[in-house]
Image (tube, helix red, strand yellow):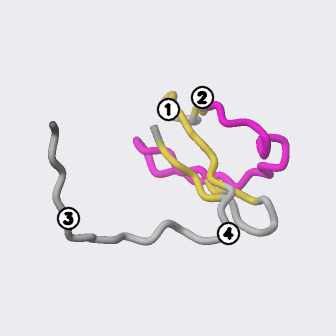
Amino acid sequence: MKTVFVGNSNQATIICPKCGLTKNIDATNFKNTKKRLKAKCKCGEVFQVTFEFRKHYRKNVRLPGEYIVR
């Protein structure tokens, strides 16, 4: 499954994992859906896509700590 980030103008760029073909689409219709969508490339590759409508990307963090199962 591939996560595609949507910009401020509701434009998303989908990249085929097999051949690298890119396509810009308008993601306004998918704003209120949390579903995985199927995308099919011209090369025949079928893959799943989810859209992220965040203002900012998630930050990578490393927090020290311990986890104990009782």
Q: As shown in the figure, which amino acid type bears the numbered disc 3?
A: Gly
Asked if labels 2 and 4 touch by Cβ distance under 8 angstroms, the answer is no
Instruction: State whether residue 60 is above or below residue 21.
Output: below
Instruction: State whether residue 6 is above or below residue 17.
Output: below
Q: As shown in the figure, which amino acid type bears the numbered disc 4?
A: Lys
Q: CA distance from mark 1 to mark 4?
A: 25 Å
How packed mark 1 is, by other alpha carbons closer than 10 Å (few <14, some 14-19, many 20 or more), is some
At 51% from the left and 28% from the top, the residue drawn is 46
The residue wearing badge 4 is 55
Q: Which badge, 1 or 4, comes first in the chain's sequence?
A: 1
Q: Position of residue 43 (x, y in %)?
A: 51, 34
At 80% from the left and 52% from the top, the residue drawn is 26
Q: Point out the residue furthest to the front here.
A: 70
Identify the element where label 1 is drawn: strand
How packed mark 2 is, by other alpha carbons closer than 10 Å (few <14, some 14-19, many 20 or more), is few
In the image, taking residue 58 as reference, residue 40 lies left or right, namely right
Circle 3 or circle 1, nearest the eye: 3
The residue wearing badge 1 is 47
Of 45 and 50, nearer the camera is 50
The quadrant the C terminus occupies is top left
Magenta segment: 14-35
Q: As shown in the figure, which amino acid type bears the numbered disc 1?
A: Phe
Q: CA distance from mark 3 to mark 1?
A: 36 Å
How packed mark 4 is, by other alpha carbons closer than 10 Å (few <14, some 14-19, many 20 or more), is few
Q: CA distance from mark 2 to mark 1?
A: 6 Å
Q: Position of residue 11 (x, y in %)?
A: 75, 59
The residue wearing badge 3 is 65
Q: CA distance from mark 4 to mark 2?
A: 24 Å
Q: As shown in the figure, which amino acid type bears the numbered disc 2?
A: Lys
Asked if labels 1 and 2 touch by Cβ distance under 8 angstroms, the answer is yes
The residue wearing badge 2 is 38
